[in-house]
Image (tube, rainbow, N blue to C red):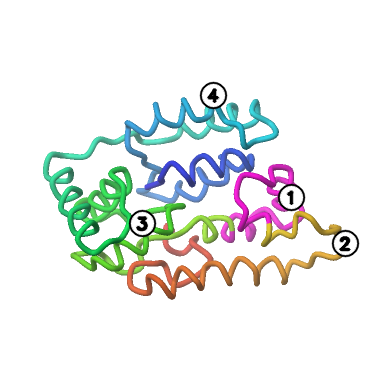
Amino acid sequence: MVDNDVALKVCAYASATDLIDLGSAPNHSLAMLRVARFTIDRRVQRARYVRDPEKLQSQWTILSAAINWIEPTTEEVEFAAELEESAMNLNVDLDGGESQLFAILVSRLSPLLLTGDKRAIVAIETIGQLLPAGRVACLEQVISTVLQKIGVDVLRERICSEPDVDRSLSIAFACHSNSYLVSVTSIEEGLASYVASVQRSAPSIIVPTTDLSAVVS
């Protein structure tokens, strides 16, 4: 399952097909909440943070065609509401879309949830209720996996061509440095540092590696 933030940023980085490939293992497919389709359609049309809005639109067209659009069941909506109430009581941030994704992750035994919302990851870890271990991954883990597939030169060009999409990734890929000064090792270490920070905040639910290939194979 994929949340809005990951979908939008992957499309902005012209990596829709790489995300599709990641979710195309046997018996798996990429899934998103059906309501997200209309939300993202509007955000794509109004995007102000991208330098190439036409690329974003074309990439979203590719990705949306490959998505399995799902609706939460009544039971999943109720479970999501319970998660939101627990989050409120614990004073942690969890919005409605993320809570529904987590509820579906649990009820349908989904293998993986890709989310760019680190606050939601921390919230779910804090709640600690009936949640499967090692089944949530952050954006930096997605990017690390794509890096292993397509190489640093291609991916760095994609990310640095859109430096305002994600500050952490622009820093990790040294988008304001000369390319000849940037090593693959330094980029991998930068991504691993961000992933480790998330893992420290959510040691139970986060995938314990930067490479997601084995999780969805």
Mark carried by residue 45: 4
To which residue does mark 1 refer?
154
Mark nearer the N terminus (1 vs 3): 3
Residues in magenta, as a range = 144-170
> Is the C terminus in the top left, top right, bottom left or bottom right quadrant?
bottom left
Q: CA distance from mark 4 to mark 1?
A: 26 Å
Q: Tell me the kind of residue under disc 1.
A: Val
The span from disc 3 to disc 4 (Cα, nearest Å) is 26 Å
Of the two numbered discs 4 and 1 in the rendering, the one whose residue sits closer to the viewer: 4
Going by the numbered disc 3, the residue's amino acid type is Ala
Badge 2 element: helix
Residue located beneath label 2 in the image: 180
Q: Main secondary structure of the magenta part?
A: helix
Residue annotated with mark 3 = 120
Q: Is residue 80 above or below residue 122?
A: above
Secondary structure type for disc 4: helix
Kindly indicate the quadrant of the structure image that contains residue 127. Answer: bottom left
Label 2–label 3 contact, CB within 8 A: no
Mark earlier in primary sequence (2, 4): 4
